[in-house]
Image (tube, rainbow, N blue to C red):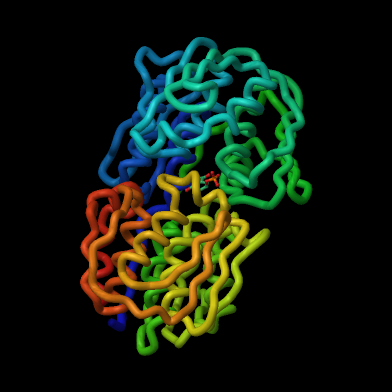
Amino acid sequence: MIIKGEITPPGDKSISHRAFMFGALAQGTTIIRDVLESADVHSTKDAVQSLGAKVRKDGNTWVVTGGSLKEPQKVIDAGNSGTTARLLSGICAGIDGVTTLSGDSSLVSRPMGRVIKPLEKMGARFLARSGRYLPLAIQGGSLEGISYTMEVASAQVKSALLLAGLCAQGTTTVNEPTKSRDHTERMLAYFGAPPVIDGNTISMSGPAKLEARDISVPGDPSSAAFPAIWAAATPGSSVLIRNVCINPTRTGFMSVLERMGAHISIENIQENAGEPVGDIVISGEILQATIIEGDEIPKLIDEIPILVVAACMAEGTTIIRDAAELRVKETDRIAAMVKGLSRLGAAVQEQDDGMVIQGPVRLHPGSIETFSDHRIAMSFHILAKAFDIDVALDDTACVGISYPNFFASMESLT
Ligand code: S3P
C-alpha cells in the first residue's frame, strides 16, 4: 500500500528522559515543551519526583524545579524503561542515602552489571538481584572520578557515568568503543557544564552545577523511521516528516536507506537546544539489499526491526551483523523478528549477532508475537500494511511505550 502526506512524529524519547533528569538536577526552573507523553518518559518523570524534584504540567508544558535531590521514600519503578533505570543509577550514585529501583518483567531481565561495575569503581555501593539485575539498591554518596573503557557502545552506560561524574570529585573519563548517541553530552553543554570530547573519549570535571534551561523536544527519528521506511520502500509513496531530530548519532537508518537507493532530502535545518532538527522528505523506490554492520550499528540500533522490513521489500540479500546488543533490548529483537517473519512465511536466517534476509520475501497473512515490545509491534504493523496482508499482533497497547498515537498517525498517511 502506498502512503502520501505529512506527519509530525512525537517528541524524542531519549531527549525527553534527559530533559526531566537534567531539570531535576539543575538549579532553578526548567521548562520542557513537546515532551513525548509516553509510558517510558512518565516513568522518568515520576522517578525524579520521588527524588524530590518539583514537577508540574502547565498546558502542554512541563515545569521542573530541581537542584536538591534526596533519598526517595519508596521504591522507584522504572517500568519498561532501560534509559530510566540506567541513567537514574548514575544520578542516584551521587545522592546521599539509599535508592531502590525496580521495573516490569522485561526490564528486570535486562543487564544492569554494565552500569553497576563502573559506578562501584566511582564509590557507590550496589545490592542487586543475582549481582546484576533489578531490583537493586544503590547506596550513593561521595564519588570519585574514574577513567573507564566501556565494553559495549551504550549511550545509557556512558550517560550514567557522565551524570555520576557531575557529582564526583575530579575528572570522569569515558571511552566508548564506537560513538553512541550523544544527547547527554549536548545537554550537559546546553545546561552549562560542557564535557570535553576527544573522538570517542568524553571527560567531565566534577563537581559541576547545571543551570535550568528551556527545552523544546524535537521529533523522534526512531518514530519517524516507521513512516520513512514504509514510504522509502514503496514506489509511488511520498511523505514529509516534520521537525525531526537529525543528530548524526541517530540518523544511521537514513544513510542505510540512501545506500539502498531511497530518495531522501532534509529541509529547513535548524538548531534547537543543542540538537539539529529538520524536515525529512522521502519518496518511494524499489530498494536494493545492503550490509549493515560495524560502527553504523549504534547509530541505528533501535531502527533495526523496521530496517528488517525494508530488507524484506528490497531486492537481494541483506546482512545485518555486529548487532548482538539487540538481544538485550525490551525483548530479544533478533529472535522476535526472525520468529515473526518465519510465521508469515519468510525464510530469514538467524545469526548470533544479526540476521540474513533474502528479499523480496513472499508472505502470507498470520499472527505474530510482539513480546510486548513496542518496536516489534510497530515494525510488523508496517510490514503488514506495506505488503497488504493481515497480520494480527498479540499486543497493540505496547506502542504506548514510545509512540502512543502510532496507529492513527500511520492511518492518516494511507
Ligand atoms: C538510549 C540508548 C540506547 C537505545 C535506547 C535509548 C538512550 O540503548 O537503544 O532505546 O536514550 O540513551 P543503549 O545505550 O543500551 O544501546
The answer to whether 37 appears left or right of 145 in the picture is left
Relative vertical location of residue 205 with respect to residue 357 in this rendering, above or below = above
Whether residue 193 is visible: yes
Q: Quadrant of residue 297?
A: bottom right
Residue 14 screen position, x and y as percent:
47, 47
Q: Does residue 216 appear in this view?
A: no
Residue at 43% across, 57% down: 220
Residue 392 placement: quadrant: bottom left
Q: Point out the image quarter for the N terminus.
A: bottom left
Where is residue 372? Give x, y as percent: 30, 48
Place of residue 293 in the rendered image (x, y in percent of width and height, measured from the top left) = 63, 63
205 to the left or right of 317: right
- In the picture, measured across the screen, residue 217 lies left or right of residue 273, that is left
Q: Most extreme residue toward the top, as rendered?
A: 97
Residue drawn at x 54%, y 78% is 317
Using the image, determine if residue 273 lies above or below residue 140. below
Q: Nearer the viewer, residue 273 or 105?
A: 105
Q: Nearer the viewer, residue 157 or 65?
A: 157
Q: Residue at x 52, y 64 (%)?
A: 355
Q: Give the x, y percent position of residue 340.
A: 34, 62
Total number of numbered labels? Answer: 0
Question: In which quadrant will I find the C terminus?
Answer: bottom left
Above-or-below relation of 81 to 304: above
